[in-house]
Image: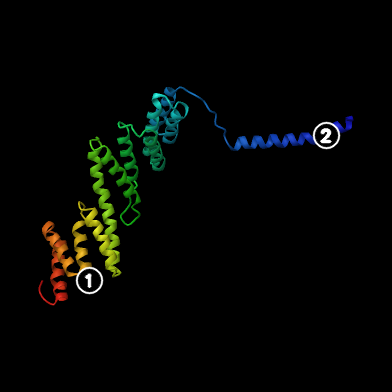
Amino acid sequence: MTKYKKIKNLFVFIPFLLLINCAIKERMEATAVPTYVEKPPELIWQDATRYLRNKNYTEAASTFEEIDKQHPYSKLAKKGQVMAAYTYYVANDYANSIFSIDRFISLYPADKKTIPYMLYLKGLCYYEQIKDVNLDQEPSRKAKYAYQALIKKYPNSKYIKDVKKKMLLVNDQLAAQEMNIGRYYQKKNRHLAAIKRFKVVVENYDTTAQIPEALYRLTQSYLSLGIIQEAKKTTSVLAYNYKKSNWYKLSYELLKKYGYKKNGKKS
């Protein structure tokens, strides 16, 4: 190769190298490349708890998770997973908390000491997302499933007392939603659909405050359809259990007025 050709090729190659260097530099400046640093589990735990004390929850949770990634067989690995789930919960990052909880349960299904707490925490994640009864009640349903699993599998758990209190609100939310839908169907004169909703309340949520109204609404819909005997039954249940309730008085007056008319004689 002549000297001229070498120089010519060099000038062609140099811009190519400069372009590559510029591209690498731009990429490194745009995205920080994390450096993997392996540490003993105890030091990672200390870092995570320090982040937690400083309320740097995102960093704390990911650092707790790092213990399991680096040292999956260490004594702190399981504790790190539990703390990660808790830290996500404290940060109101319910999706990541639930993901961590489900992962823990799948990895350690026989851990009778920790799983009750994880189920309780899972229920809390859903419980704290419960919205107004006019909005979607999926969090209420999922909170109920988590709490039911806890009650069924670990009936002597220390969390049961609090769970049962929370279940009262959860069930009341779900019952109230059924009542809203039932009342809507009544307004549209879709009484069979309304009856179905009110029956769900009576059969599935019999400890809630919605029961007296649900029985009254059943009486209304039965009478609208001319089903007098069923209307009598619901009014009798109201009389037996809620005789002092205004819903019983309304039901009785309605049956007396509308029920007699339908029969053409006294019942």
Expressed as whole percent of the image width and height from the top left, the position of residue 4 reads 88, 32
Q: CA distance from mark 2 to mark 1?
A: 96 Å
Give the side of residue 132 with respect to residue 249, left or right.
right
Q: Secondary structure at mark 2?
A: helix
Q: Quadrant of the C terminus?
A: bottom left
The circle on residue 176 is none
The amino acid beneath tag 1 is Ser
The residue shown at (18%, 58%) is: 212
The residue shown at (22%, 71%) is: 224
How is the rendered protein coloured?
rainbow
Q: Nearer the viewer, residue 221 or 67?
A: 221
Residue matched to label 2: 9
The residue shown at (38%, 42%) is: 94
Give the side of residue 265 with respect to residue 39, left or right.
left
The amino acid beneath tag 2 is Asn
Give the side of residue 76 with respect to residue 216, left or right.
right
Q: Can residue 87 be seen?
A: no
Expressed as whole percent of the image width and height from the top left, the position of residue 41 reads 43, 24
The residue shown at (80%, 36%) is: 12
- Quadrant housing residue 5: top right
Q: Secondary structure at mark 1?
A: helix
